[in-house]
Amino acid sequence: MDKEKKLFSETRVYPVVFMIIVALLFGTILAVFYHSTIKRVELSEELRFKQSVLSLFSLPFDDVIESYEKHIIEQEKDGYKYYVAYSDEEKIGYCFIVHGAGLWGSITCLVGVDPEFDQLIAIHILNQSETPGLGGRISEPTFQEQFAGKPIFEGEEVINYRLVSEKDAAKETEINQITGATASSKAIVDMLTDNLKKIIEILGDQI
Amino acid sequence: MKTKEILKQSIFTDNSICRQILGICSALAVTNLMMNSLVMGLGVIFTTALSSYTISLIRDYTPRSVRMMVQTLIIASYVIIIDIFLKAFFPDISRSLGPYVGLIITNCIVMGRAEAFAQKNKPFDSLIDGVGSGIGYMLVLLVIAFVRELFGFGSLFGFKILGDWWTPWSIMVMAPSAFFVLGLLIWYINYRSLPKQA
Amino acid sequence: MEINSFVIFIAAIFTSNILLTNFLGMCSYLSISKDMEASAGLGMAVFFVLTFTSGLNYLAYHYILVPLNLVYLQYIIFIIVIAAFVQLLELVIERFSPVLYYSLGIFLPLITVNCAIFGISLFMIIRNYTFIQSIAFGAGSGLGWLLAILALAGIRGKVREKMLPKGMNNAAISLIITGIMALAFIGFSGVVIIQ
């Protein structure tokens, strides 16, 4: 390895020059690769979001863009963005993006509410960083499906679902938690209560 | 060294995880599902092979003082490429593996092979060694994941194998099982390679 | 994001211990834990590096990478920040405590590729922590790692080779002991309650 060293390679400048060349070379390769795929990544993110919104209301998503355009209207009030879903000219529900604090990081979730604001249509968790295999199971269909059809109000107040064990039958005002993941399950329930209260305040008499 | 010899050594005799005890972190983290293990294994094979190859290519020109930094830069670049690739073409898997793709950079196997082999051998041999080390790593991962996914979820690669009669062992999904399964595996392999005593 | 920083700190030590739950930092953990003193030294170094690099990487990410639209280079930048900090730390230790420097020996450069340090920076970005939360997370993770390695070193000190079944080498028994520790730590998961 030492046999053919040029004189230049023994100078102190050489390592610096070498590093710069390598860094530039690889930096350029990465930049090219990144920019050639960025559109694709953004498109797939957008598709994923729109598809989630559509599936919340059981709307078809064979052609996500077209279906979204046809069924979903984006609205805004006081800087708060939300979505209204229509099917055959009839309003079938509202969709909100809600945020909450999980055990580990923020949770982002889509919540579908019926037009009369009586019950939840469905929830769909978009992002969470809970413990995989434990709290992370809140993303499983079986957990999320139980929110479909749950009432929003208990009397005059926005409901805060009580957690019951995974094995028990859950009443209308209860949610089966995930065994060993009480904190994450509670995080979802609290997130819904807090956000729904805020939403009702913001939207006021529009609903 | 002949290609076949290099392969045999890097996959089996000097298996990165069981013999050299390298690359443990991800071996424990992603093995709750076989699909994740497969993707991670492929990622490591890709990274180790290409970075060993590149590092070996420029080994005669790399000044000793910046050797580690250059290696790290090259490895990091390949990992970023994998990360971007996954995000663009397989976003679900990218989300499932999360930060563990980036952690391939600090996977001791990649750096270890660069230091131990690529610095001293020809590019093509380094490439083969990288491939072999990666394959050895992937095989161990798949074995552990097989146990953990089958008993923890009742499925393999997402396909339900065990019926509803099976109550999944929650522990298999959680951290401790990974330690146990890997520990037992290393013990078994070590036991098998002990010289036979009279 | 409203999680209390102190809660993150405590949780990082016990309920989501960087090593026992997230499997980071295993390589040096397995090899160094034979020796109690070296483990303590390495653990402290890891704690120190983690606390500072979490903060540094947060700043690098939010004030350099994001504004310049270079987020995809975050892996490279983080590793460089960590490597530079460790290099600096090495110089400082060599200058002020040659004893510590000689006992840590090769471990300092090893910290650079310790997946724990790099992993924490990655996690903190994904979880969108604020600056204070990142530091709390780094410090807590460092303490958690220190705790785990001290515990393992202590236990391994008591295990005599005669006790082990045939063929069980250091790595295997360390892993099994760690697994039992991980099981025990799961018992902490009720401690942290998020308001």
Image (cartoon, coloured by chain):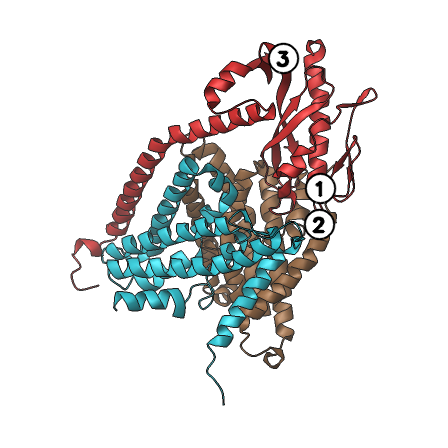
Q: Residue B130: image x %, image y %?
A: 34, 58
Residue at 47% x, 41% y is B94
Q: Mark 3 lies on which chain?
A: A
Let me know if marks 3 and 1 both belong to one chain. yes
From the viewer's perspective, tell me whether residue C162 is left or right of residue B40: right
Residue type at the position of mark 2? Ser
Q: Does residue A81 appear in this view?
A: no
Q: Which chain is red?
A: A
Pick the front one: A88 or A77? A88
From the viewer's perspective, tell me whether residue C79 is left or right of residue A113: left
Residue type at the position of mark 3? Lys
Q: Determine whether C151 is above or below A192 in the image.
A: below
- Quadrant housing residue B123: bottom left
Residue at disc 2, secondary structure = helix
Identify the residue under disc 2: C189
Chain C, colour shown: brown
Q: Residue A112: image x %, image y %?
A: 64, 23
Q: Determine whether B159 is above or below A198 in the image.
A: below
Tell which tag, 3 or 1, sits nearer the viewer. 3
Residues under numbered marks 1 and 2 in contact, where contact means CB atoms less than 8 Å apart: yes
Let me know if marks 1 and 2 both belong to one chain. no
Q: Mark 2 lies on which chain?
A: C
Residue at 33% x, 49% y is B74
Give the number of the disc on residue A91. 3
* Crowd class of label 1 (few under 14; some 14 to 19; many from 20; radius 10 Å): many
For the residues labelled 3 and 2, the Cα–Cα distance comes to 44 Å
